[in-house]
Structure formats: C-alpha cells, structure tokens
Amino acid sequence: MSQTTKRALEASLKKLLLEKPLNKITINDITEDCGVNRMTFYYHFKDIYDLVDWILAEDAAKAMEGRRGFGTWSEAYLDVLHQLQDNKTLVLNVYRSVGREQVEQYLYRLLDTILKDFADRECHDITVQDADKQFVVDFYKYALVGMTLEWTRRDMKGDPKQMVERVSTMIHGDFRRALCRLSSGSLKIEE
C-alpha cells in the first residue's frame, strides 16, 4: 500500500506541474488530487521537496535498471539527456524553483554510476587506485553536470545528440588517458 500511495502522490504532483509551477503547488493540492489526506502525505514525506527528492531518486534508479549495456559513456549520457527531456516539465519546474540543487544531485547520482561503470571497463588492463579512479570520475561528472545544467537552464533547447557528439569529440580518449596517467603514479602534465 505504501508504494502505491507514494506512486499516487508522484502522479498527482506530475499532473499538477503541467498546470502550475512547483512553488505554487501545495500539499493540499496534491492530496486532494490523489484522494488521500494530509496525514497520509506526511506519513511518507516531510514536504513537497522531499517528494521531489524521492521522485528523482526513483527515476535515477529506474534509469539505471538494465542499462549497463551501453558501449560508451556518450551513449549513456545521451540516454540521460533523453530521460530529462521525457520529464521536462518536472525537471524544469524543480530547476526553476528553490530545488535546483535537487536536479544537480539527481544528475550527480546518475552520472557517477555511469562513469564508474565506464571507468571499471576502461581499467580492465591497468591498475588504478580507487581514489584516483574516483578523481577522474568526479572530474568528468562535474563537467557533464555543468553542461547539462546549462542545457536545462536554456529550456533544454538544442539537440541532445549534437551536444553529446560535440563533447565526445572534444574529450575523445581523454578519460582513458587520465586513468592511464594516474595508474603509473606520474602526474606530469604533457606539453
């Protein structure tokens, strides 16, 4: 019952977001729409932003289910951008409200998982300390989140495929090179 109620609250919030911005939606609006009382809402969530966090975490988990088969990070990143477009109303409403950080955290969780998986595959023939691997993952994760947030700020205008192709062309092979450089312990900057 609990998961069903959470899903009903999620559906109501998403429906209401089609009508008005997040900061104009009340808990009363959500509970009236899905036919539960306020106490039921508070049993599951402390406020609307807690519900949004749960929705984004659930979406991130769903997004990663069975999607480890991507051949490249760019295919996985393109998939993330398409998922954002599929939930454009929710993402833009959260981004434009006081919940921008929630969108960032959602993206960090998604991209961290994708890039760690890719780093593990890239390190199959080299030895890289976990901390060094995480450093490389973080570097690319923050770059991609920054690009994604800017794209989101611009109302997701622009073709995601073209954006991914440009980023991929720009950093082609650098992910592995960074891991290889750190594997030898030398942090020399090549000229």
Image (cartoon, rainbow, N blue to C red):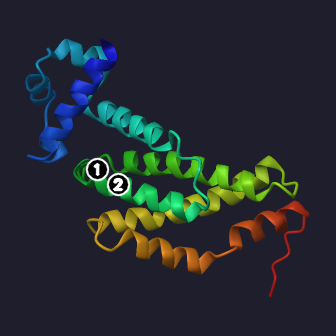
Quadrant the N terminus occupies: top left
Question: Which quadrant holds residue 152?
Answer: bottom left
Q: Is residue 158 above or below residue 64?
A: below
Quadrant the C terminus occupies: bottom right
Front residue (pair 125, 29)? 125
Q: Residue at x 44, y 55 (%)?
A: 80
Residue count near mark 1 (Cα–Cα under 10 Å), binned few <14, some 14–19, many ≥20: few
Residue count near mark 2 (Cα–Cα under 10 Å), binned few <14, some 14–19, many ≥20: many
Q: Say what amino acid the circle numbered 2 marks.
A: Leu
Residue 84 badge: 2
Q: Say what amino acid the circle numbered 1 marks.
A: Asn
Q: Are marks 1 and 2 in contact (CB under 8 Å)?
A: yes
**Horizontal relation, residue 175 to residue 76: left or right:** right
- Residue 7 position within the rendered picture, expressed as x and y whole percent measured from the top left: 27, 26
**Horizontal relation, residue 71 to residue 1: left or right:** right
- Residue 181 position within the rendered picture, expressed as x and y whole percent measured from the top left: 83, 68
- The CA span between labels 1 and 2 is 5 Å
**Horizontal relation, residue 74 to residue 5: left or right:** right
Find numbered disc 2 in the image and state the secondary structure of the residue it sits on: helix
Find numbered disc 1 in the image and state the secondary structure of the residue it sits on: loop
Residue furthest bottom as drawn: 191
- Residue 96 position within the rendered picture, expressed as x and y whole percent measured from the top left: 25, 55
**Horizontal relation, residue 74 to residue 132: left or right:** left
Q: Is residue 141 above or below residue 63?
A: below
Q: Which residue is mark 1?
A: 87
Number of numbered discs visible in the structure rendering: 2
Q: Residue at x 88, y 54 (%)?
A: 127
Q: Residue at x 77, y 49 (%)?
A: 131
Residue 122 badge: none
